[in-house]
Image: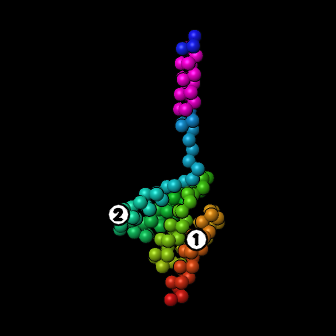
């Protein structure tokens, strides 16, 4: 009797664990962001700024279509890519979007914005 109850408990616990894992849902839409950042540092030159802007913009559109929030850092990275291309207006817009979506990024984004302003004034 005790063995039977123990087996039932183990079976029920296993079933609950499997059901819990199967129901895992992503909080943010990551798209190709992590791969782009990884490749940028591990394989320099593997994805130029134009390619990264295109992929990140597509990821943002996919997140919107899936009604999922875009992952933290995506807009900041997009802003960085725009800045590297010299499109300061788009860079600032992307940085401000990051700051709006993730207020905890404010000091980082403010630093990026001040660097852009410093470069423009030179």
Residue farthest to the top, as pictured: 1
Residue in the image at 54% along x and 14% along y: 3
**Other-residue count near label 1 (Cα within 10 Å), few / some / many at <14 / 14–19 / ≥20:** many
Picture quadrant where residue 21 is located: top right
Which element is circle 1 on? helix
Can residue 79 be spotted in the picture? yes
Which element is circle 2 on? loop
Q: Position of residue 8 (x, y in %)?
A: 56, 19
**Other-residue count near label 2 (Cα within 10 Å), few / some / many at <14 / 14–19 / ≥20:** few
Can residue 92 be spotted in the picture? no
In the rendered image, the quadrant that contains the N terminus is: top right
What residue would you read off at disc 2?
43
Residue in the image at 49% along x and 55% along y: 31
Q: Position of residue 25 (x, y in %)?
A: 57, 44
Q: Closest to the observer: 54 or 34?
A: 34
What residue would you read off at disc 1?
109
* Sequence-first tag of 2 and 1: 2
């Amino acid at each position: 009797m005790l063995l039977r109850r123990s087996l039932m408990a183990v079976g029920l616990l296993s079933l609950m664990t499997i059901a819990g894992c199967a129901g895992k849902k992503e909080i943010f839409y990551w798209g190709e962001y992590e791969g782009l950042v990884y490749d940028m540092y591990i394989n320099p030159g593997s994805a130029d700024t134009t390619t990264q802007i295109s992929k990140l913009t597509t990821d943002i559109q996919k997140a919107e279509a899936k009604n999922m929030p875009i992952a933290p850092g995506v807009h900041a990275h997009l802003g960085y890519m725009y800045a590297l291309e010299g499109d300061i207006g788009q860079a600032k817009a992307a940085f401000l979007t990051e700051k709006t979506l993730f207020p905890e990024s404010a000091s980082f984004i403010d630093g990026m914005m001040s660097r852009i302003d410093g470069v423009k004034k030179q």
